[in-house]
Amino acid sequence: MPNRKATRNAYYFFVQEKIPELRRRGLPVARVADAIPHCSADWALLSQDEKEKYADMARAWRAAQGKDSGPPEKQKPVCTPLRKPGMLVPKQNVSPPDISSLSLKNDQALLGGIFYFLNIFSHGELPPHCEQRFLPCEIGCVKYSLQDGIIEDFHSFITPGEIPRGFRFHCQAASDSSHKIPISNFESGCDQATVLQNLYRFIHPNPGKWPPIYCKSDDRARVNWCLKHMEKGSEIRQSLELLTVEDLVVGIYQQKFLKEPSKTWVRSLLDVAMWDYSSNTRCKWHEENDILFCALAVCKKIAYCISNSLATLFGIQLTEAHVPLQDYEASSRVTPKMVILDAGRYQKLRFENSGFSHFNYSNQEPRSNTPTGDYPSGVKISGPNSSVRGRGITRLLERISGASSCEAALSPSLSPKGGYKSFSPLS
Amino acid sequence: MAGRARVRARGFTRSPSASEVGYLQASPTPVSADPSDNKASSSSGFEDTSRISQQHKDVMSSGNAERALMKRGGKTFPDVMDLGVCTREKLTHVRDSKTGSSGIPVKLVTNLFSLDLPQDWKLYQYHVTYMPDLESRSMRIALLYSQKELSNKAKAFDGAILFLSEKLEEKVTELSSETRRGETVKMTVTLTGELPASSPVCIQVFSIIFKKILKKLSMYQIGRNFYKPSEPVEIPQHKLSLWPGFAISVSYFENKLLFSANVSYKVLRNETVLEFMTALCYQTGMSSFTQMCEKQLVGLIVLTRYNNRTYRVDDIDWSVKPTHSFQKRDGSEITYVDYYKQQYDITLSDLHQPMLVSLLKSKRNDVEARMVHLIPELCFLTGLTSQATSDFQLMKAVAEETRLSPQGRQQRLARLADDIQRNKDARFELETWGLHFGCQMSLTGRVVPSEKILMRDHICQPVSAADWSKDIRSCKVLSAQSLSKWLIICSSRAESMIEPFLSCLRRVGSSMGFNVDYPKIIKVQESPAAFFGALQKHVDPDVQLVMCILPSTQQNYYESIKKYLSSDCPVPSQCVLVRTLSKQGMMMSIATKIALQMTCKLGGELWAVEIPLKSLMVVGIDVCKDAFNKGMVVVGFVSSINLRITRWFSRCILQRTTTEIADCLKVSMIGALSKWYEYNHGLPARIIVYRDGVGNGQLQTLLEYEVPQLLSSVTEASSNASSKLSVIVVRKRCMPRFFVEQNRALQNPPLGTVVDSEATRPEWYDFYLVSQAACRGTVNPTYYNVIYDDNGLKPDHMQRLTFKLCHLYYNWPGLVSIPAPCQYAHKLTFLVAQSIHKEPSLELANSLFYL
């Protein structure tokens, strides 16, 4: 009997809500189970955000069921298919702890903070009934800080292992349409255990706390699955915390402007084509074969985007490590609009600390502190809105750097102790 | 490849609509080349795997028609689903008559045949239950069919539902039968319904009947169509054979049940996979053989002639040999060699060949797909490789056979009708059901008057509406911005061609009123990265246009240029292939074409037609799946922004869904209305929306989901009298074909032929319009269905307006098959789905930057 004892999912609540309407249409629906066939089309039409509402209801229900309904880790996406990010752990509920602690620190700590951007490519995605959902074939990782740009990078091809019988075409087609790494007879691959070991050594050379790792939200399910899969094959067990770059951007933006940027803005910030061909961005193999899809390039381009649009706001002089400079000179003309946009919005919402309330509810992990909404308001503010005209990045930089030094003087007293931890694993 | 200046100096062999190209190009899969596509499939080597899998699915879901009915779990066919949507009854002005009257009447022959039924004909639907219950469907069927009571009745049975043309005496009939094992099985046949001939279920039963009939004419179903392997057309010089066949359907038109048939061909290669492998082995040698083999074969569609089924090669299993055994469905083990001997009486010659693996698609996604092993020796390659499609001679040979003239088509149809009437089994089948196969239908259409083309200071009446490029050669275009600051990026190899081309372009430009200054020429190395670097370095927002002379058709060049110039740095761009410029003799026409495109990209207007309706906004919407990210759907929205309908506002939105139903129309519509307001200081009195890209069975969703979005944005836009809205669904693929008889021979109907009776549906406000010329083959009429209409235009006016709009596509100086806004929307979505993969910048929305 459906949903009597089993868990109720988001769809259940959607169907439940639909039942009165279906009855009005004269359909004989007594229970949710009867209504399910009539609702699937409508459900498919809902956007991810709309679905989120029902997912929340389901989550609330599960919480109300008590602990015996299964620990929340169970819902972590081990085998969930890609492109259902909404079904994974709710995005903002997981990532905030770090960002909230982040937003309480002063700029200096943020600027020095180390982030890792990770991406793993796969030979396509196999259908949900398969045990093996992905075939990892390339990994790229970048160590980055706002201050220093890309500090180190890591790249390796992975031997994907045996392709499940019958899926050769599927994998081949998927690979041909993107990274074009051959599915067999490709010598440069390393075996999965070695790659994982190297990756861990790269991310975490010294004992201590593990740093958070970021990847784009679209790739998250895949990267997560591949990491878990590779762990299974090797001895090492280390649950990495995989967060989304989008949330990181939101966090940094809030740190600077005390408000949340729009989703579209974040997406457009991260999705630019201008560095597609920049030198020293792709791995050697992809560069030589002139293929744009490269796991390392994805990570590096995230770093470039963040440098280009966010690091500049903190008054950092961009170096070769931040963006490929020869392209930057030419392209900076193209993107001044971003700064203008911020200034206008910023002014409106100057004293609202809406960004903080957003994080308050979601602290699941014990180590994160409750953020206090107390931010040194007004100190660094006079800068941006008058100075941004056209490409005036340099002028902006001057203003901001002046402001942030002020702020740095103020903030240590306000920053909670926990805040540093997640960011400075190396110090 | 969409936006590249495909300069065709000669000929209108194909109408400039690219969706059909996409269909034909489904790279190795174009298993059926429908001759009615009056266009050569120009290959650009892009791959459309979704189409392949789609076709694959079709193949799987076909097979036995009865099973298909059952597999669908009682759900009706999508086309039948649309029939239940009655839109006409809500449109008061066409409730009584939806036919127009203007134009010259013309007598048309169709590919429709009437099917006559007795007045009181009824279909009786029974439900059959078994006691004890039987799992096996074939067993269920065998037991029921062995009954005497049913033996001489016309029946169709899928294992649970039985259709009879005659009523059984009792409402509930108890039957019993004995299986081979000696078990007695009781069957209860219960009457569940009496259906009149107009019921949608009857249509399904009729198509099942015709499937049976065609099988009796020794035609085999492959995919959805039926082919006759016994009469192949051989093209020996290319190792190809074509199986002739038909696509058929039975449905209710205006007041009659009609059977329609279209000629179709299946392209087969006379080469088995084993032969292919052997040849490959000689070519490459043993060392890299397996690798090459996998590379070449995986993904191809093969046909096994013993059962005429198609499969996709998903993998090659080198470890299994024909002498290995496998488990049959009943559990017994048998070797492949013995199996083929027993089942099909085929002896395998090579016992060491590897096996091909194919995954059978299951209907439900979560169930594991079933794998089948196929013997290479018995698998024939189908379709054409991309190598073959780029072979001009080969494509010409195929086209000669498949592109039937109206006359040839008529002969084939007549022969099919003859066969159905003469064949004893077929006639018997029809007679037991009480059907009578009637004669070919002819009807009266109308030819609407031709249009004048308005240029800047000249009104021209083109000689042929199919192509007026000659008529406007010396005329000035309506408006054109002069081009003063622009760039040409080219490789140093192409440098020598630039000078003659530029002078030609300037000369042509000045004669059409488009002023072209000398550009800044940037020479770069021959690599995508170098081109891209040059763009980043030299393009700034002041640049009006960038022209890139591409050294090859390599996708990378085009994609990176378009991607950068349409979103990161919005500047109109024009890509031209070096190869195009090297055609010396055609330089004039090439330059003309490019100049016209560039004018449009800068926001110019080329020509207009007279449109009497004042304050009319026309909108075209098309939907396309993203080629890279399958979960994304690209929705293109193009609307006119001036009274003359010469300037357009184009917007494209990506949405994450699986259905091809647009979500975001409100945003686009409101944007379009505000743009209109900006230009005209008021809102349009009438809005007419042409919606293309609607699949079968989506009509209801469209009506419930898209029309309200449009309506609400229109009403929200103004507080008092809001604009009146009409929504028209445009469909390029439809069953009917029309011919005119001239000098005792059949020909294509003249341009502007409208059919709005007899071949239309009673429950819709619909019509056919022939607005494209086919110089070879048979023309496809375009089908229009007005699903929502506040405007209350007379059918005459609606038809003529639609015809006028077919003149306004600026990429082709002639008529196109669908209204211009639709064609623009299509072009836009195609560019975004193939190359850009994200929303183009709104700064470009005022010009036709995607032409």
Image (spheres, coloured by chain):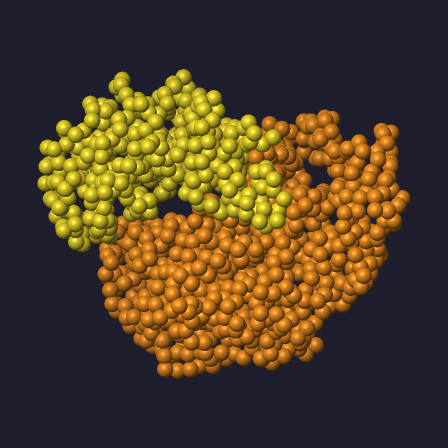
Chain colours: A yellow, B orange
Q: Position of residue A54 (x, y in %)?
A: 45, 39
Residue B355 seen anywhere in this rendered image of the structure: yes
Q: Nearer the viewer, residue A190 or B251?
A: B251
Q: Residue at x 52, y 37 (%)?
A: A12
Res A315 quadrant in image: top left
Q: What is the number of callouts on the image?
A: 0
Residue B828 showing in the rendered view: no
Quick one: quadrant of the N terminus of chain B?
A: bottom left
Q: Is residue A7 above or below residue B378?
A: above
Viewer-nearest residue: A14 or B618: A14
Q: Tell me which residue sits at (84%, 35%) in the image.
A: B186
Q: Position of residue B185 (x, y in %)?
A: 84, 33
Please tell me whether residue A260 is drawn above or below residue B738 in the rendered image. above
Q: Position of residue A339 (x, y in %)?
A: 21, 49
**B798 to B549, vertically: above or below:** below
Quarter of the image containing the C terminus of chain B? bottom left
Give percent across and percent down for residue B846.
34, 64
> Foreground residue, B714 or A138?
B714
Residue at (88, 45) in percent of width and height: B149
Q: Toward the viewer: B452 or A167? A: B452
Answer left or right for B420 relative to A297: right
In the visual, does A115 lie left or right of B257? Answer: left
